[in-house]
Amino acid sequence: MIKAHDHEYLHESTTCEGYWAYDEGKSGKRPGILVAHEWGGLGDYVKKRCVMLAEMGYVVFAADIFGKGIRAKSHAECEPISAPYYQDRNLTRGRANAALKCLQEHPLVDKSKIASVGYCFGGIVGLELARSGANVLGTVAFHGQLNTPTPADAKNIKGKVLILHGAVDPVVPPAEVAAFEKEMEDAKVDWQLVAYGGAVHTFTNWNLPTSGGGPAAYNEKADKRSWIAMQDFFKEIFA
């Protein structure tokens, strides 16, 4: 049976409210997955993804990067609440590492087998966590932004990296992808990038329409294929 609940924790003086999901009927330690939310804050979509991961046998903790109660109530609020974390990557790394510490300290987690999963803005969170030198075996970004002001920090990445990207994502243009690829190659990271044809930004979010001409839309094929790619990646890194 999956147990899922909110959990308060601190990053310095800021109270954050993350989200646990795990099978309490299963005994023994198991891999842990840290999940990073989109630019609107930790909400129902990412919580559902956490439950899906828990059903696969992992202990899952969703980070709260913005702090307790800071959630966008409209699309217009997403940019102002996320902007400080794009601008101050040390702050982003600090919030991510605080959540990682919670996951590492859970009694059911095998500390030697931890990965992160990020969605959109959460892709930056997961990558900055890896660039900080955190002990994670793998970093997965679904339609995540890839830019960083400190590409040389890729040398600190200890695990493998999987990028699941919409081939026609206008939010993450080809120049950003190319810069990321160079960053990974220069640092000799074990990385891979899968691009899904016809997919734009946020292609895994079933709450979005499948069309409409905007920068974001749900793409069922890309959603299902990328979820399988993530599972194969976990089988590899947790073997």
Image (spheres, helix red, strand yellow):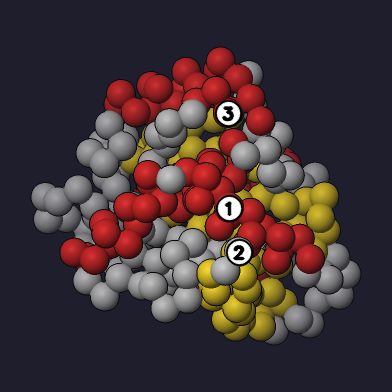
Name the kind of residue labelled 2 in the image: Glu
The secondary element bearing badge 3 is classed as helix
Q: Which tag is nearer the camera, tag 3 or tag 2?
A: 2
Which quadrant is home to the C terminus?
A: top right
Residue indicated by mark 3: 153
Q: How many marks?
A: 3
Answer whether residue 126 is visible to the viewer in this image. Answer: no
Residue indicated by mark 2: 12
Which quadrant is home to the N terminus?
A: bottom right
Which of pointers 2 and 1 lies earlier in the amino acid sequence? 2
Q: Distance between the residues labelled 3 and 1?
A: 15 Å
Which class describes the residues within 10 Å of circle 3: few (<14), some (14-19), or many (20+)?
Answer: some
Answer whether residue 152 is visible to the viewer in this image. Answer: yes
Find residue 138 and report its image quarter. Answer: top right
Residue nearer the viewer, 63 or 178: 63
Reply above or below: 100 against 69: above
